[in-house]
Amino acid sequence: MTDMHLSDVSTLRERARKNVENGAVTEGYSADREEILRLLNESLATELVCVLRYKRHYFMASGLKASVAADEFLEHANQELEHADKLAERIVQLGGEPEFNPDLLSKNSHAQYVAGKTLKEMVYEDLVAERIAVDSYREIIQYIGEKDPTTRRIFEDILAQEEEHADDMADILKDL
Ligand SMILES: [Fe+2]
Ligand SMILES: [Fe+2]
């Protein structure tokens, strides 16, 4: 077992009263907050770039009358936006500022924005982007470890959905 010990009630109460202006960030928060905020903002950029890419693919695929792919693109766009919202919310809880500056998004994003000309190119690029997201979120989860369980759980939930997204794109790609 580890040598960890639980704080007694009076210590917890006393600590909670210190630095109340830090909101959700208490003295027991042991992660490197600046680093966590940087990772959250990079991930926010990744999600927002993915929203834009899926939106383009949705409208382009609708034009190509590729309705199965179009439905998936739209569903993914909406889910990436939910991911972005969860990350932005967590950034604010940790006392940071979510970066929505469009000039910085593609620079900070792990995944790239690739327009794609044909349906096959679009699905391929989406699959690549999902695989990048899966790898980077898995690494972030490992990095966070036990230091910030709430942020880790957010990334774990998002990761599970990115794996589904990758699987969806791989399935569609097989039939193209
Ligand atoms: Fe996402
Ligand atoms: Fe995704």
Image: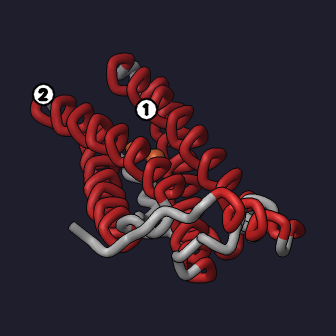
Residue at 42% x, 21% y is 71
Element on which disc 1 rests:
helix
Residue 67 is situated, as x and y percent measured from the top left of the image, at 38, 17
User: Pointer 1: what residue?
Assistant: 73
Residue 105 is situated, as x and y percent measured from the top left of the image, at 62, 68
Look at label 2 and name its amino acid. Asp
- Indicate left or right for 152 with 119 as reference: right
Residue 175 disc label: 2
Q: Nearer the viewer, residue 103 or 152?
A: 152
Residue 18 is situated, as x and y percent measured from the top left of the image, at 83, 73
Would the CB of label 2 be found within 8 Å of ligand 2?
no
Look at label 1 and name its amino acid. Phe
In this picture, is 139 found above or below 70?
below
Residue at the farthest right position: 21
Residue at 10% x, 33% y is 174
Residue 9 visible in the snapshot:
yes
Residue 44 is situated, as x and y percent measured from the top left of the image, at 58, 60
Q: Nearer the viewer, mark 1 or mark 2?
A: 1
Residue at 25% x, 48% y is 124
Question: Which sits earlier in the primary sequence, circle 1 or circle 2?
Answer: 1
Residue 101 visible in the snapshot:
no
- Indicate left or right for 145 with 152 as reference: left
Residue at 41% x, 42% y is 157
Which of the four quarters of the rendered structure image does ligand 2 lie in? top left
- Indicate left or right for 99 with 5 as reference: right
Q: Nearer the viewer, residue 107 or 82?
A: 82
Quarter of the image where one finds residue 76: top left
The N terminus - image quarter: bottom left
The C terminus - image quarter: top left
- Indicate left or right for 38 with 114 as reference: right
